[in-house]
């Protein structure tokens, strides 16, 4: 079983809640927390939903973002280098102090594209395509460049694994004092079976914008109660809010933490079921279900919009939005944003989220495309690339 088969395909499958990982391999869920009564909670949610209608924007429509779609298509097909990006998933972004856009990817193909739109197999299967579990790309003046560690002949991930049985997939990133703080989830292999791998812990890697090929240091983040931080981050009111997911396959639950100031290295607080904050991660409460492993919370007008793939449906092609008057929720009023046209047969889509710093005709949202059949990624390079849409609001 090569690294490509053991890491890339299970990622997409697990994100859709179809994982066959045995129960003992799944990260332990958070401990039960004191909760308000169901009647009181329902009344509170109803009051919040009524209030949210006054400030939360309504989705007007969504269209394909032609600029970003062609940018990544043309760059992925460009054969001028043998060690650059031809496809990836994850697709987070961060505006750097210089004004450049940093694109943050998880599983990544590097190499060349054949004239017929196929790609050679990965190196582990006798081909020439390099497969890394994470990478960066930088956009400046409408041009992309790939960033990896290692050499052109032997590229390595920007966030290197500690050994062959561990790897990192990217979460959201933020800036603190001009330094990039990129979050990652470490996964580990514990057996020889196809599904013998599991989430292990959360970390934050800090990068200097002028040297993005390797972190200057790596720090552990809260990881003791089965929540993957950070599916999304948002800076608001002197805090950095950190949104996470408790992934039980199906359902997936949203959790929320915050850190005072700009850096994720500060003291974390976790939202409890009663809406107050606790320094103990064990008190972190399930805020809502139906979110994906990657989603976003963005301020739009006077309200906040949560964008996610709809994981309340199996293999859903639906990207949906929830709204709130507060970054802490509750997020209500589910609205259909977009139905992904790629979904069907072997192909599925997942992990939609917004890019508020990226210029578009509305709020830019990306989503990932994947296949349950490994060889599809060799047959057609266009499958394993992000898609972009522009979402407009009333």
Image (spheres, rainbow, N blue to C red):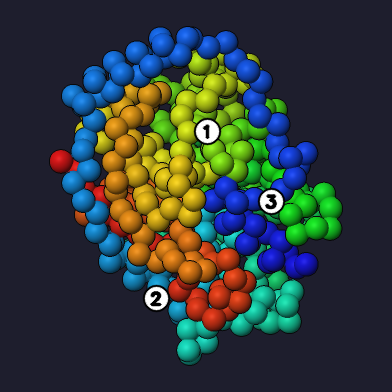
Looking at the rendered image, the quarter that the C terminus falls into is top left
Marked residue nearer the N-terminal end (3 or 2): 3
Q: Where is residue 147 in the image (x, y as percent from the top left)?
A: 56, 62
> Does residue 11 appear anywhere in the picture?
yes
- 115 vs 338, left or right, is right
Q: In this view, does 189 lie to the left or right of 392?
A: right
Q: Is residue 192 above or below residue 227?
A: below
In this figure, which residue is indicated by the disc labeled 1? 253
> For mark 3, does the 10 Å Cα neighbourhood hold few (<14), some (14 to 19), or many (20 or more) residues?
some
- Does residue 368 appear left or right of residue 48 in this picture? right
The residue at which mark 3 appears reads as 20
Residue 45 sits in which quadrant? top left
Across and down, in percent, residue 54 comes to 18, 24
Determine the residue positioned at 36% across, 60% down: 340
Question: In the rendered view, would you say 267 is above or below 2?
Answer: above
Of labels 3 and 2, the one closer to you: 3
Toward the bottom, the furthest residue is 115
For the question of whether residue 263 can be seen, the reply is no
Image point (69%, 51%), residue name: 20
Task: Report which residue position mark 2 lands on.
Answer: 74
Instruction: Mark 2: give few (<14), some (14-19) or many (20+) Cα within 10 Å.
Output: few
């Amino acid at each position: 079983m090569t690294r490509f088969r053991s890491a890339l395909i299970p990622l997409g499958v697990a994100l859709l809640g179809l994982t066959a990982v045995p129960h003992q391999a799944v990260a332990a869920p958070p401990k039960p927390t004191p909760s308000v009564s169901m009647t009181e909670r329902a009344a509170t949610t109803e009051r919040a939903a009524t209030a949210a209608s006054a400030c939360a924007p309504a989705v007007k429509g969504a269209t394909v973002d032609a600029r970003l779609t062609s940018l990544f298509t043309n760059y992925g097909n460009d054969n001028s280098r043998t060690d650059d990006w031809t496809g990836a998933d994850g697709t987070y972004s961060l505006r750097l102090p210089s004004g450049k856009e940093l694109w943050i990817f998880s599983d990544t193909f590097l190499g060349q594209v054949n004239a017929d739109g196929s790609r050679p197999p990965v190196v582990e299967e006798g081909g020439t395509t390099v497969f890394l579990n994470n990478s960066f790309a930088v956009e400046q003046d409408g041009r992309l460049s790939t960033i990896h560690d290692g050499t052109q002949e032997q590229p390595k991930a920007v966030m290197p694994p500690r050994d062959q049985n561990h790897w990192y997939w990217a979460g959201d990133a933020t800036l603190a004092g001009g330094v990039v703080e990129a979050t990652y989830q470490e996964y580990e292999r514990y057996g020889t079976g196809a599904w013998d791998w599991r989430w292990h812990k959360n970390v934050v890697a800090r990068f200097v914008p002028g040297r993005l090929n390797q972190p200057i240091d790596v720090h552990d983040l809260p990881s003791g109660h089965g929540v993957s931080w950070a599916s999304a981050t948002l800076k608001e009111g002197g805090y950095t809010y950190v949104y996470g997911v408790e992934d039980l396959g199906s359902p997936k639950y949203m959790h929320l933490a915050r850190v005072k100031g700009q850096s994720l290295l500060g003291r974390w607080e976790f939202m409890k079921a009663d809406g107050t904050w606790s320094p103990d991660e064990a008190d972190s409460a399930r805020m809502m279900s139906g979110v994906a492993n990657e989603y976003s919370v963005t301020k739009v007008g006077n309200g906040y919009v949560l964008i996610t793939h709809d994981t309340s449906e199996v293999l859903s092609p639906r990207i949906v939005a929830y709204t709130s008057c507060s970054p802490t929720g509750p997020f209500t009023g589910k609205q259909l944003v977009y139905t992904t046209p790629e979904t069907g047969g072997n192909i599925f889509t997942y992990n939609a989220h917004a890019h508020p710093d990226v210029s578009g005709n509305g709020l830019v949202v990306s989503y990932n495309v994947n296949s349950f059949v490994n060889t599809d990624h060799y047959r057609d390079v266009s499958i394993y690339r992000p898609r972009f849409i522009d979402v407009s609001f009333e």
